[in-house]
Amino acid sequence: MNVAMRQSAARPVLPFQAFVSAMRPTHVLLAATLALVLAGCQAEAPAADAAAPLPAPETAAAPEAAAEDAAPAAIAHVGLMAHEPWSRPLAPGATVAAGYMHLMNHTTQPETLVGARAEGVGRVELHDMAEVDGVMQMRPIDGGVPLVVDGMAAFQPGGKHLMFMDVTRSWNEGDVVPVTLVFESGTEAVIDFAITASKGEAAGDEHAHH
C-alpha cells in the first residue's frame, strides 16, 4: 500500500489545458465531435417529448339504460280497442261471471257491439243495470251497444257489462280469458280479459241479481 502511494505521488498531475494540449490532434477532433453530438441529443430530447401527440380522449359509450329509460311511444288509437278488460274470479261452484272494459271505436264508421263468445263459456250476453222502483235490476241490452266514430262505451260495475253464463273453464285469479267480441258489421275482435279481484272489490256483483 505504501508503494502504491509513493508511485501516485511521484506522477505529476497536469492541468486541464495541459491535458488538452498533450492530446493528439485526432483525439481533439474526436472529443469535439462527441461533445457536439451529445449537445445535439440533449437539445432534441425535450422537443421530441413536446411534439408527441397526446392520446385522444375516449368517448364514453352511451349506456344501454339510456335507451330503456326513453319515454315509450304513444299507443296508436286505431280500429276497435278495449282498455283494461277484466273480470272477477269465480267462487267455487259459481258458473256466472261479469266482464268489464272501456270499448273504443277508432275506425272510420260507426259500429255496434251485438254479442260475444268465449271458449269454456256456454253463452255471453250484454247486460245493463237500471233502477226500477228504487231497486237496481239487471236486464239484457236490446239492439246491442252502439259506438260512434271515436266514441267509447264504458262497461263497469253498476252499469253495462258482459255476462258470461255457464262457465266451465278456469276462472281464477291470474287467469287470462280470450273473448271474441262480435259487431253488427261482421267485424270480430279477440280481447284478453284479465281475471283479478283487485279492480272491483268495492263494487257489487251484477250476476248476483241474475
Image: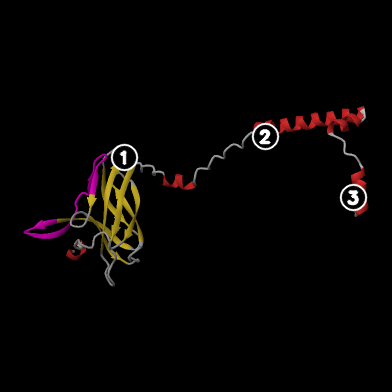
The residue singled out by tag 1 in the image is: 107
Residue numbers of the magenta segment = 130-153
Colour scheme in the image? secondary structure
Quadrant of the image containing the C terminus:
bottom left
Relative placement, left or right, of 189 versus 45 is: left
Picture quarter containing residue 152? top left
Picture quarter containing residue 97? bottom left
Residue 182 has which mark? none
Q: Mark 1 or mark 3, which is nearer the start of the sequence?
A: 3
Where residue 188 sits: x, y (%)? 34, 48
Per the image, is 94 magenta?
A: no
Residue drawn at (89%, 50%), measured in percent from left and top? Answer: 5
- Residue toward you, 33 or 203: 33
Where residue 17 sits: x, y (%)? 85, 30
The residue singled out by tag 3 in the image is: 5
Residue drawn at (32%, 47%), measured in percent from left and top? Answer: 81
In this rendering, which labeled residue sits more in front, label 3 or label 2?
Answer: 3
Question: Dot 3 lies on which element?
Answer: helix
Q: Amino acid at mark 2?
A: Asp
Instruction: Mark 1: give few (<14), some (14-19) or many (20+) Cα within 10 Å.
Output: some
Q: Mark 2 or mark 3, which is nearer the start of the sequence?
A: 3
Q: Is residue 203 above or below residue 25?
A: below
Question: Dot 1 lies on which element?
Answer: loop
Instruction: Mark 2: give few (<14), some (14-19) or many (20+) Cα within 10 Å.
Output: few
- Residue toward you, 82 or 24: 24
